[in-house]
Image (tube, grey):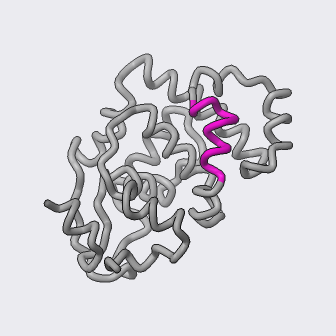
Amino acid sequence: MSQRCQWCSTDPIYQHYHDTEWGVPEYDSGKLFEKLLLDGFQAGLSWITILKKRDHYREVYQGFDPHFMAAQTDTDLLRLLEQPGIVRNRLKVKGARQNATAWLTLASQTDPGQWLWQFVEQRPKINHFERFSDVPAITLEAEAMSKALKKAGFTFVGPTICYAFMQATGMVMDHTVDCFRYRELVE
């Protein structure tokens, strides 16, 4: 069996995510929007909880269509809070609509994907951490992204969430050096 990052559990869903998605550079704006929202939903919860709910989120948000999400009424949001397949947190559900609106505003001005990648100068930052305990929870880049996203009208985008998002989307590559994905992604 290949060595994985220490944070990856034995759950097959988690392992698949680690092995195929986490740390892989993502440039598609739609996928970046989805991952940004999922990281916001994760606040205060374990990532595996969100991974297990991701397909249901995709269903209720019509593939994370920001136009659909921004157009949701308060009644629509109340219906979402009855969905057992998502995190039924009123602030997070309302925040998703707010973030969709902010995303559309950003998209009317620039390419959101390129805008997000500016915080790492448009290319992945490759880290070389030996232990999981060496990986930071927040960086200056994540703080800058958080501040810019909040200024643009987003919510649930604190610096810890932004750094997790940067790791997930490969803006920073934080697989530890003993992980098999480290070697694959560095090459």
Q: Is residue 131 left or right of residue 98?
A: left
| Magenta segment, prevailing SS (helix, strand or loop) | helix
Asked if the magenta segment contains residue 54, the reply would be yes
Tell me which residue sits at (32%, 82%) in the image. 131
Which residues, given as a range, are shown in magenta? 53-64
Residue drawn at the location 53% of the way across and 48% of the way down: 157
Image height check: is 103 above or below 2?
A: above
Q: Within the image, what quadrant is residue 155 found in? A: top right
79 vs 121: above or below: above
Where's the N terminus, which quadrant?
A: bottom left
Q: Residue at x 59, y 26 (%)?
A: 101
Looking at the picture, does residue 53 appear above or below residue 2? above
Q: Position of residue 68 (x, y in %)?
A: 64, 22
Q: Position of residue 80 (x, y in %)?
A: 79, 38
Is 113 within the magenta?
no
Q: Nearer the viewer, residue 178 or 93?
A: 178
Give the residue furthest to the top: 108
